[in-house]
């Protein structure tokens, strides 16, 4: 390889849809529909359809989506919310933003999704909700987590930030719990050209309140029903997402094909991959593997001009921001093992066959 293989390459995808994107951005300017407006509403309708939910509210980030979901779910200061330890920190931030307490639960040692069997022991009288994360694009075991939630009267929220279009028992993620939260950060499977997020649900009351909360707690101009936020999606993001949503299934299919090439091609018992139960269909937002000696492998891949990522090098419960939670090393061993041994391989629909083969052949050589 002459050029390094980038970990992520947004330019390649942009070039394939450049004309459509230009037209969409121009249309926003022509209509001066810069904040919320028709393009955002069109996207909300399209995305609700895509997720098979009756409602969708677009917001300005995935973090805001989780924050508003927790407010409408009625999470109050001092409540506890179960969160997986191995996720992007924003899952936990949202809990802290409503002055509730994130209670971290370990993942399983093989699927790296939340371990449903370890939730119950963390439930107290203060526990009000569980946020499950469809990590790396692979759905967590929704039925198993839901049955714990139902048994204890807890609300289930899905963090779908990495899993647009993923299937759990042939059903799209997002509408499987009370509320589904998405991020459209540019590198996501469905990425905006800026920041964006959305909350989907089948609950009209939730949706109406979210639409008010994101708009300063207001549905009638200058009438403010409760403390609100400016979390509106801007018009450009709505227009871009409308263009890109049409390609999402195609792009996800290509990700699945690349994942299959990795799974079949990397025959090396020193490299472990995310175990996949038969009832899920991942959309491979990230292709994470674990290796014994990560520093050495990273160095080797860098020499081979393969640029990799780490998702995530520090588990949430050991982040300094949560040091007041009293967690210590060894508390959640599977999440900690993952944090210390994970490497994320390049994964995006525009990777070429040659690049994928080169990555596979390079990984075969690791001992
Ligand atoms: C699992 C998870 N939750 C939440 C978020 C937050 O989304 P955003 O960056 O759009 O605020 C992200 C994305 O970065 C994520 O990966």
Image (cartoon, rainbow, N blue to C red):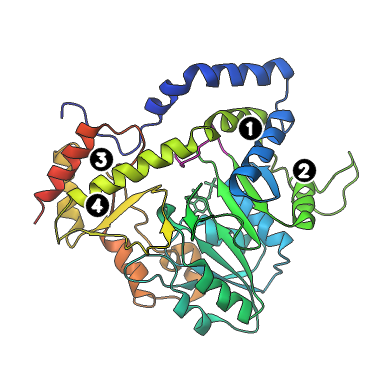
Q: Quadrant of residue 81?
A: bottom right
Q: Which numbered disc, 1 or 3, marks the residue closer to the eye?
A: 1
Toward the viewer: 257 or 237?
A: 257
Q: Which residue is mark 2?
A: 215
Sequence-first tag of 4 and 1: 1
Give percent across and percent down for residue 110: 32, 68
- Label 4 residue SS: helix
- The residue pinned by badge 4 equals 263
Kindly indicate whether the residue at mark 1 contacts the one at mark 4 (C-beta within 8 angstroms): no
Q: Quadrant of the N terminus?
A: top left
| Foreground: disc 2 or disc 4 | 4
Residue 329 placement, left or right of 54: left
Q: Earlier in the sequence, mark 1 or mark 3?
A: 1
Dominant SS in magenta: loop
First in sequence, mark 2 or 3: give its number.
2
Q: Which residue is mark 3?
A: 307
Residue 142 left/right relative to 305: right
Disc 3 packing (10 Å; few <14; some 14–19; many ≥20): some
Q: CA distance from mark 1 to mark 3?
A: 31 Å
């Amino acid at each position: 390889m002459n050029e390094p293989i980038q970990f992520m390459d947004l330019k390649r995808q942009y070039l394939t849809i450049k004309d459509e994107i230009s037209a969409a951005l121009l249309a926003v300017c022509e209509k001066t529909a810069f904040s919320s407006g028709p393009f955002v509403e069109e996207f909300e309708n399209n995305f609700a359809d895509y997720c098979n939910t009756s409602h969708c509210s677009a917001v300005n980030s995935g973090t805001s989506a989780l924050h508003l979901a927790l407010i409408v779910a009625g999470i109050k200061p001092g409540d506890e919310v179960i969160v997986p330890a191995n996720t992007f920190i924003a899952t936990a931030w949202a809990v802290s933003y409503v002055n509730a307490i994130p209670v971290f639960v370990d993942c399983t040692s093989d699927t790296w999704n939340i371990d449903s069997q370890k939730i119950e022991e963390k439930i107290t009288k203060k526990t009000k909700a569980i946020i499950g994360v469809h990590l790396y694009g692979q759905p967590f075991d929704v039925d198993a987590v839901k049955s714990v939630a139902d048994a204890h009267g807890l609300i289930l929220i899905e963090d779908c930030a990495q899993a647009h279009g993923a299937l759990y028992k042939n059903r799209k993620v997002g509408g499987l719990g009370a509320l589904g939260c998405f991020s459209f950060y540019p590198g996501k499977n469905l990425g905006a050209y800026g920041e964006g997020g959305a909350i989907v649900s089948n609950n009209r009351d939730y949706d109406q309140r979210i639409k008010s909360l994101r708009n300063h707690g207001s549905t009638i101009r200058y009438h403010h029903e409760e403390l609100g936020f400016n979390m509106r999606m801007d018009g450009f993001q709505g227009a871009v997402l409308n263009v890109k949503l049409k390609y999402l299934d195609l792009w996800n299919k290509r990700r699945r094909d690349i994942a299959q090439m990795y799974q079949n091609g990397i025959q090396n018992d020193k490299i472990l991959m995310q175990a996949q139960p038969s009832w899920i269909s991942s959309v491979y937002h990230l292709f994470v593997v674990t290796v014994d000696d990560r520093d050495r492998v990273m160095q080797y891949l860098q020499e081979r001009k393969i640029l990799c990522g780490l998702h995530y090098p520090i588990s949430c419960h050991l982040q300094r921001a949560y040091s007041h939670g009293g967690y210590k090393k060894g508390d959640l061993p599977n999440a900690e093992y993952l944090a210390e041994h994970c490497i994320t391989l390049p994964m995006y629909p525009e990777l070429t066959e040659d690049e994928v083969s080169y990555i596979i052949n390079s990984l075969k050589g690791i001992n």
